Image (spheres, rainbow, N blue to C red):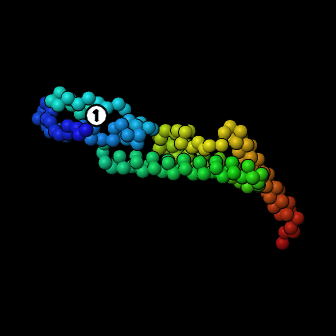
Amino acid sequence: TEGRSGSTTDLDGREILFHSIHDTSYGEPDGLWGINCHHGPPNVFIPGLSSLHGSVPDPDDNAAAYALTQQQRKLERDVRAAKREAAMLDAAGDKEGFEKAALRLKQRQQTLKDFAAENNLYLRSDRTQVHGYGRSQAAKVTAAAKTVAKRAEWDIAFEQQHLAASAKEKPQM
C-alpha cells in the first residue's frame, strides 16, 4: 500500500516534509521496528499540529561520533577473534599457544575498555560474546594471562640479578 508522503507547514509557516510509515521498510524483518531494530516506536504526525522535537545534529560532530563507534566495533571484532583463537588453542591442547592467546585477549579487552572510557562510549558485552566461550574459558584465560605476566616479571628480575652479578665480577680498569 502506498502511503501519504508529502509536506505541510508548521504553525510558523515553515515547510515540513514527511514520509508515510508505509513508504519505509516497516514490517520487514530487516526494516524499521523489525528484528534487532533499536528505533523507538513511530511518532504520530498530524499535519498542522505536530512540530519537530529536538535538533538536527551537527554533521561534523555526527561524523566524528560515527568514526568513534566504528573504531569501537573494530576493537570488539578483535576481542571476538581473540576469544575464538583462545578457545581453539585450548580445545587443541596447545598450552603454550593458549597462554599467548590468553595474554593477547586480555590486552585487546583492556584496549577496548580504555577506548570506551576515553571516548565516553557504552560497552555492550553482547557485542564481544562468542559461542563456546563461557565462564570456564574466561577463567582459564585469566589464569593463563596471570601466569604469563608473572613469568615475565620473574624473567625480568632474573635478568636484572644476572646483570648485577656480572657487573660485580668484572674488574675495574
Q: Is residue 10 visible?
A: yes
Which image quadrant is residue 42 in? top left
Residue found at the far bottom of this picture = 173
Residue found at the far top of this picture = 49
Residue found at the far left of this picture = 13
Which image quadrant is residue 18 in? top left
Secondary element at image label 1: loop
Q: Position of residue 38 (x, y in %)?
A: 41, 36
The kind of residue on which mark 1 rests is Gly
Task: State which quarter of the image contains the C terminus.
Answer: bottom right
Nearer-the-camera pick, 144 or 34: 34
What residue lies at 17% left-to-right and 27% top-to-bottom?
A: 49
Q: Position of residue 45 (x, y in %)?
A: 23, 30
Q: Is residue 55 visible?
A: no
Task: State which quarter of the image contains the N terminus.
Answer: top left
Tell me: residue 134, above or below residue 64.
above
What residue lies at 40% left-to-right and 48% top-to-bottom?
A: 66
Nearer-the-camera pick, 36 or 118: 36
What residue lies at 49% left-to-right and 47% top-to-bottom?
A: 72
Give the number of callouts: 1
Q: Is disc 1 surrounded by few (<14), some (14 to 19) or many (20+) residues within 10 Å?
A: few
Residue 14 lies left or right of residue 136; in this view the side is left
What residue lies at 35% left-to-right and 46% top-to-bottom?
A: 62
Nearer-the-camera pick, 166 or 157: 157
Q: Position of residue 29 (x, y in %)?
A: 41, 40
Q: Position of residue 59 (x, y in %)?
A: 31, 48
Residue 52 lies left or right of residue 61; in this view the side is left
- Residue that label 1 marks: 54
